[in-house]
Image (cartoon, rainbow, N blue to C red):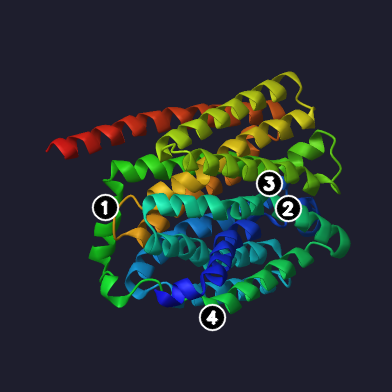
Amino acid sequence: MKEVIRNRFLLMCAVVMMLVLSLFSSDIFLPALPDIVRQFGVTPSQGQQMLGHFLLGVALMQLVYGPLSDSLGRKKLLIFGTSLFILATFAIIYAPNFKDLLALRLAQAVGASASIVLGRAIIGDLFSKEEAGKIFLTLFPIVGMSPALAPMIGGQISNLFGWHACFIFAGLFGVVLLFLTLTAVPETLPREKRNPLSAVDVMQGYIALLLSRRFWHYALIPCIAYAVFYAYIAESPFLLLKQGVSNKVIGFTYLSLSLTYVTGNLIARWTMSKGLTLDKALATGYLVFVAGGIVMFLTTHFAPNFYIGSITAISIMTLGNGFLLPLGTSGAVTAVPHNAGSASGLMGAMQIGAAAIIAGIIGPLSGHNPQTFGMIVFVLAIAGFFIFQTTRRLSYRADLNRQLS
């Protein structure tokens, strides 16, 4: 633990990169997606599978990395995953056809998923729920900017050098993370705290989480938030083109999402520093989130070609996500003591799985129609708030019964 304290700054830099890697890599190519679609001769909905395949791989592998890291430790798995990510990312540049490109995206996801699970687990190893919440609120302004900044960066890179350069950039990002992992990240899970590695133990760990109302209460929050965000991320290149935005400037439209997300993080951090509880801060974030869903419905219904309305609506929702994502993550990872790795993996699988599903179906479901898309976002926002309030009451009752027994 002394080594952790001695290298705290570099460790936090590495953790930020771990949390950013998969989110950054999932989105950096999006402004160039119409170019990729044209080069490989596929439909826009098929092109969106590049996002869906990646997210699905990240979701499924988190179920594996979580319990493995609880048994084998964090660092070795992180080195393995980051190395695989680097190899797959550079290989994408040479993909001869779209089928191989999708396969490499899946391999890229298998590697990237290690970093997001282990980054959260490392924080869970070192800090309590409230401390972890404050740390996530410190780190998540940077982390949360990545899905929005990545398309902006990717747009400029692809405009200058072509879509292949987006993946070269992502691969170099992985190289830097691997270097930091080797030099600045210690093993944060001592051998005496590791769980035995067996299918029975893994299943028992997941069953304990699945039976925990507190885990469900917190883990479902990032699921809804990510589903809405990635519905927009997947649809936006085609939605904004239909609304009259030039392909060359689409990347810049994501800047507002970064700014509002960071603003939400800062407000959430300030409210918690004033004594607001985790659940009350989450409730505040959900009210903002729902307000954005209402704006999205109204603007796309009454002014379907008004792109400023769509960008404003999703920006309000990302302001709410500034509360929901870090605080929901903190609550879920610390919900069941001594099971941070499995909790991180299961929550991440649910969270990214929700994003993968919505990214895969949003095109066919909406028909790339702004009004239909706005209705889907509105329904998701209202459903998410209802689920949050319901699980909050159930979790409170379970805690009260446990105290009385």
Q: Earlier in the sequence, mark 4 or mark 2?
A: 2
Q: Are marks 4 and 1 in contact (CB under 8 Å)?
A: no
Measure how far apart labels 3 and 1 are at the Cα level. 36 Å
| Residue under label 2 | 151
Whether residue 96 is visible: no
Q: Earlier in the sequence, mark 1 or mark 2?
A: 2
| Residue under label 4 | 182
Q: Measuring from the top left, give residue 318's x and y in whole percent.
A: 62, 39
Whether residue 45 is visible: yes
Identify the image quadrant of the N terminus.
bottom left
Task: Give 183 or 65, whichever is nearer the viewer.
Answer: 183
Relative placement, left or right, of 363 versus 271 is right
Q: Are marks 4 and 2 in contact (CB under 8 Å)?
A: no
Q: Which mark is residue 241?
A: none
What kind of residue is marked 1?
Ile
| Residue under label 1 | 207
Q: Earlier in the sequence, mark 4 or mark 3?
A: 4
Quadrant of res 344: bottom left
* Residue 282 position (above or below residue 70): above
